Image (cartoon, grey):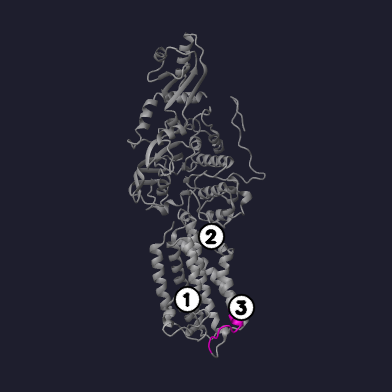
Amino acid sequence: MTVLARGDDPPEPPATGGTHPPRPPMAPAPGAAPLRRMIAAQATLETRTLLRNGEQLLLTLVVPLLLLAAFGLEPLVNFGAGLSRIDFLTPGIIALAVMSTAFTSQAIATGFERRYGVLKRLGATPLSRPGLIAAKTATVIAVELLQGALILIVALAIGWRPDASAAAIVVVPLLILLGTAAFSGLGLLMAGTLRAEATLAGANLVYIVLLGVGGVIFPLAKFPAGARPVLELLPTGALSTGLRSVLQQGSAFPVGNAVTLMIWAAVAITAAARTFKWD
Amino acid sequence: MLMKHKQLAGFSTSGVVLSTLVEAADRDYRLYVLRTAPRIPRSRPAMSCRAGSSRGGPGSSTPPRYAGCCHRRLASVSTVPQIPAVEIGRLVKRYGQTTAVDGLTLSAARGAVTGILGPNGAGKTTTVEICEGYRKPDQGTVRVLGLNPVRDARALRPRVGVMLQSGGIPPSVPAADYLNLMSKFHAHPVAVPALLDLVGLTTVARTPYKRLSGGQQQRLSLAAAVIGRPELVFLDEPTSGMDPQARRATWELIGQLRSAGVSIILTTHFMEEAERLCDYVAIIDHGQLVAAGTPGQLTGTVGQLRFRAEPGLDIESLLAALPPASLAKESPAGHYVIEVHGAVDPLLLAAVTAWCAERDVLANSLRIESRTLEDVFLELTGKELRP
């Protein structure tokens, strides 16, 4: 406390330094950062948050890798005569990984961001909504690359020998991208309209159901003949079947599955964009 | 002290007019800041304006803010002072059958701290969120830094800092990580370590948001609102949930922002906070403006001079010795009260003591009082509890 008597000079401000950082300037100097830097910062934080979250890791990494190892090593399911278990499993597990990240994980994370007002608060920053969507997409792709690398290592170690044409190097990423778009659209549709708890429950339920009927572990051929075309029209069925036909059966491009995923993506993204509530 | 009296003496002459204006404020929508005191440029560093935060509460002898403490450095010379920070005209917002904001008109000056006061449900948050671009008005106009908060959102977002009433921060993210993120959104952000230090969060920099105390969470949210060096910040109940130490630190930060030339709009229902921080206060209730002015104007509309003496003094003769429009009463016996519009000035005090001296009356316990902002607030918004 400073006591001034009449005639005193005003006190000098205390010297900064020592243990305290200098007092920061507060004078207005507004300005948005370049969009690229904003997206990179947001995506980095989201990726780090996801990778630190135990439940999310369980969904995106532990379950797919565990299923790959368990069903790949032990004859738990008869995939059909003359086929290698791991050759059948790997494309399905890749489809499961895409669904877990783009749909389940993204829906739950975004649903809670909405509940906690995080999306509302971000709306007041220079990061635009398209910028935020771009950051979320970058986050999903980063996690998928990590998943892909780990699945590849485990599958090759178990003995996976993909039977694919050269075109697979382009077609597989394309199918994964289409699947990511379709699942992201569905996940954001759910997160933007339902309560966070409902999204949590719903996204997990869909994950379990599509794990069962999406051609991930259990061949769609095992389902009744009438059900099979319908299951192949579901996004998980379309992605797993498409990947399997490229990686296991050596086909060049599964047009039907690609078109199915494209339609899912278009419908889901449009619906999400129209209905999404930010707060 | 001298300054205060001069200031208030000048003020009392307009006191009658002023109180009429305040009473008529809900009818007359054009009551703006009546800040007329000249601004004296002073070459002391911006830090010295921290005196602003030590401005005392009721009864303190510190000069009113508009008299002694508004010489902040206008650091960004490029800002056009003519355009108000916020200008709201006949704003209406309805939610179904409820009218949250009902014809509100308000103007907040650049570089000033403007407080929006009101009971729960008065429409404070709705008003602020319309200014922030979160909601669209049903009727009326809103201009923020001269721009439309919805249509010009893209241009406004870098220039405006926002602190929501609650939440907005991911629970598992550490304080420093969150500020790092926010700093990356801006071209010239405040350095994160310095800002953490300023809001007293250095020791909990690695603590996730959800494990911070309520007051720490509020301070992190405040830091995020100012990290981008905005021209204008909206603070929705910035000190709710804070202990007295944190509240004082926050007041200090708000004082620093003001000294640096930042315009601040805050909502609060702490009257002491409004009285200390705000250059200008708007009291709203049921979505309407019920009073507006500087805290001094609002509390100073009635000044009281009280003393104790023998019962039965000649009130009529006392009144005759006082300036016109004064009021004198003995209530209860032996307790004398003289009320004037505006503040009690030295002339009134001299008149009363001279009158006493002539009659050989000793005025005991002589004191000069004015109402607190809380008195005014309760008078205007009633005492019944709000939902």
Foreground disc of the pair 3, 2: 3
Q: Which mark is residue A236?
A: 1
Q: Amino acid at mark 2?
A: Ala
Local crowd size for mark 1, using a 10 Å CA cut-off: few (<14), some (14–19), many (≥20)? many
Q: Secondary structure at mark 2?
A: helix
Q: Quadrant of the C terminus of chain A?
A: bottom left
Which residues are the magenta region?
A: A68-80
Res A131 visible: yes
Mark 2 = which residue? Answer: A41
Question: Which of the pair B310/A191 is nearer the observer?
Answer: B310
Q: Which mark is residue A154?
A: 3
Query: Are circles 2 and 1 on residues that touch, CB within 8 Å?
Result: no
Query: How far separated are the C-alphas under marks 3 and 2?
Result: 31 Å
In the rendered structure, does residue A144 fall within the stretch colored magenta?
no
Location of residue A153 in the rendering, given as x and y in whole percent from the top left corner: 61, 77
| Res. B80 image quadrant | top left
Q: Amino acid at mark 1?
A: Thr
| Res. A262 image quadrant | bottom left
Q: Quadrant of the N terminus of chain A?
A: top right
A77 to the left or right of B134: right
Q: Chain of mark 2?
A: A
Q: Amino acid at mark 3?
A: Val
Q: Residue furthest top?
A: B359
